[in-house]
Structures are given as C-alpha cells and as structure tokens.
Amino acid sequence: MFKLSLYFSLIWSWLKSEKGSAVSFVTWLPLVGLILGISSLIVAMSVVAGFEETLYESVARVNGHLHIKKNFKDRQEFYQFRDRLIEQYPDQIISVRPLLIIEGLAVVKGRVEGSLLHGIDMQEAPDFLTMQFPNLLKLRHNEVALGQGLAQKLGVTVGQFVHLLVPIDNVEGVHQFRREYRTYQVAQVLHLGKHEYDERVVLMHLNELQNLSQTSQHISAALIGTRDRQWAQEMKMEIQRFLGIKYKVYSWYDINSYLFESIKIERIGIFVIIFIIVIASAFNAGISLWISVIKKTQQMSLLRVLGMSHHRVKLLMLLFGGAISLMSFILGLPLGVLLSYGFDWLHTEFNLLPGSVYKIDHLVTKIRLVDVLVIFTSQFVLSLLAAYWPAHWATRFRIVEGLRFE
C-alpha cells in the first residue's frame, strides 16, 4: 500500500528543519558526532595500515621475502642451492640472490659508527632492491652506498670518502683479531625506510666485501624474492623441511615479528577506543530520534489512520536512523581521506613519528577497502540498534493520543 518513495519523502521532511531549508539542529548534533567519529576511524586505520605496509616494504627491500641463512663456502655451492630451490618452487620463486653480511666500522674524520656491510652481487642484485634504487646497478667496486641516517651521522655526502674497517681472525690467537680497512667513495645515499637500516647499512659489491674481510668466496645468506609475500610466510616451514636443518629460513614477517604482532593488537585497540566516539554519537542519534518521535506523534497517528501498520511505522523510524548513519558516512569518508593526506604532510614536515621510537622514518597512510567496509558496517549496525528502541516505542502509542487536539 505504501510505496518506498513515501518512506523517503517522509524521512527527508523529518531531516529538514521546521523552516524546510536545511537539516534541523536536532539532527545535526548526532550527525556531527558521527562524522567526526567516522573520519577519526578512517585516519587511525589508514595510519596503522600505512605503518604496516611501510615496515613490510623496508624489511623486504633489505632482507627479501625469505631470508635463508647458510654459510656457503663458494659460489658453486650457492648456485647448486639456488637451482635446487627454483626447481622445487618454479611458480613462486622469482629470484635467489647471494648476500654476505659483515659487521664493521665506518670512519670519517674521527667520527666512528658501527655498521652492517652488505655485500651484494650487483649483476644479480635483488629485484626488490634495484626496483627501488636502480642506480645500485651502476655501483663500482671502489664505491659504496650508505643508509641515509648513517651518512648524516658521519657527515658525508655523495662524492666524499669513508673508511671501512672489519675485524679479521688472527691465526696466532683465538682471542685476538686484527683489522683490515679500505677507503671507498660514497656513490649513493639511500633511504631504506626502516630506521635501523638507515642508521647502519652499507651496500657494496660482494667481491669487494669478500676481499676486504678476507673470506674468500664465502656467502652468508640467500635473499629470496617471491611473487606473493603471503606465500612466503605460509610456506616457510615447508621450505625449511625441504632444505634441512643446515639452513635457517626466515620470512619477512619473522625478521620483525614483534612489530607486526604489536600492529595487529594496536589496530584493534585504536579501533575500539575511537569507536567509543561513534557509540556515543549513535546513541545521541537515538535520543534525537526519540525527540522526533514525540514531536511527530500527530503525523504518525495520521499515518496509522491511513492504514500504516505497526511494523511499517517501526521500519520508517529505523530507516530514519539509517539515513542519519548514511549521511554521516557520506560526509565523514571524504573528511577522513582529507585528514589522512593532511597527516602525510604533517609527518613529512614535522616528523610526527620519529624513527628512533617507531622504527621507520617515513610513513604514507594507506586507506584499505576492508577498513572502510568495517567502519561503515559497524557504525550503520550501531545506528540501527540505537534507533530500535525509539522505533519500537513509536508503535506502542495510541492513535487517539496523537489526534486528541485535532
């Protein structure tokens, strides 16, 4: 009997002020609260998602999707391992690259900083590293690339020189060692993303680091690039069983598992805390709906006289609460996106998340569709729950009470 267009026209007339020119003040109060709550949730979730994605990219950039530790005595042993692994997983593994890591010191004009020297075969440089820094392929044997933080600590820029010192085992005594050092030109200063990488990592040719550390053709690890990072995490144990106990397999997740686990917990905690704003606003909307029911008793009595059933009256009031929820989401979503971009700018200008505390020194917010859907669904369901009791009460008043003074 009652068409859907009638419900919408009634809802629109109730949303407007008594003058009929704008949204009524009673409607604006919960609307503003819901808008602020939704936009805050979007900003918070985008910051957490951006933090997680930035952390993943920085870890994968330096350590690969899989980091396999094994002391390979020479390149021939490494190539046999590489061919064996690719033959076993041809559809997922896209690169297997050699890596040598040596702890050492970087010295410039009396400034001494501890560093991690990464020896990489530039002819077979990891795809996930060279895609971000293509100029690494041009690195010569007498050149190195420093992390941005390390370069700042040493006070060097591109074109200047740095002394690299590494400890060498002394055959004359187990508890003694000697040093070996060489001078290299700084060819590149890299922004590796993760604070501890920027503060310590030095990238150089694999052969050059082998010569400096006098380790012959020694290779300490293999960096594995895969098509899917989740596959790397899920198949880690199977690869470990396939390779045997002489190999130690770590995924991108394992290398900073405590950070990724804390992100999961923080995402839930932040969502719950900010969602309290949405809860308060939703029940404020329920109170406003109650007031609207009281003020519009006469109109609903007329609708009842015209044949609208109890269930249709309840549906009308629930749709009214849903309309407020939908309006708040439509207005809150672009505001949240705008504030997310504003956070990116503020972080770039004022370093809101210092790398020494949060482990990464840059962050780009990321708005995920799943977060938007969760926010919309939760606030919409909550708004309907808040509107249920006023809607239920609207079906219980007597028609004669609404028409008593007519």
Image (cartoon, rainbow, N blue to C red):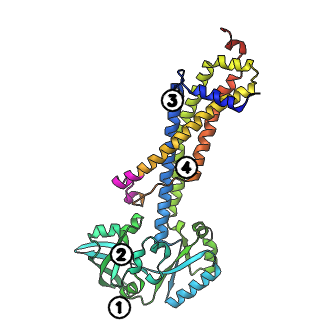
Residue extent of the magenta highlight: 344-357
Front residue of this view, candidates 184 and 3 = 3
Query: Which quadrant would the N terminus be assigned to in this image?
Result: top right
Tell me if label 3 and label 1 are in contact, CB under 8 Å.
no
The crowding category of the residue bearing disc 1, from other C-alpha atoms within 10 Å (few below 14, some 14 to 19, many at least 20), is few
Q: Secondary structure at mark 1?
A: loop
Q: Earlier in the sequence, mark 1 or mark 2?
A: 2
Query: Which quadrant would the C terminus be assigned to in this image?
Result: top right
Between tags 4 and 1, which lies in front? 4
The residue indicated by pointer 1 is: 172
The amino acid at mark 3 is Leu
Q: Is residue 124 shown above or below 234?
A: below
Q: CA distance from mark 4 to mark 1?
A: 58 Å
Q: Secondary structure at mark 4?
A: helix
Q: Which residue is located at x 61 percent, y 39 percent?
A: 380
Tell me if label 1 and label 2 are in contact, CB under 8 Å.
no
Q: Quadrant of residue 65?
A: bottom right
The residue indicated by pointer 4 is: 268
Q: Position of residue 292 (x, y in %)?
A: 60, 23
Q: Which residue is located at x 62 percent, y 35 percent?
A: 322
The amino acid at mark 2 is Ala
Front residue of this view, candidates 379 and 31 = 31
> In this rendering, does residue 183 appear at all?
yes
Left or right of 328: which side holds 197?
Answer: left
The residue indicated by pointer 2 is: 145
The residue indicated by pointer 3 is: 29
Q: CA distance from mark 4 to mark 3?
A: 27 Å
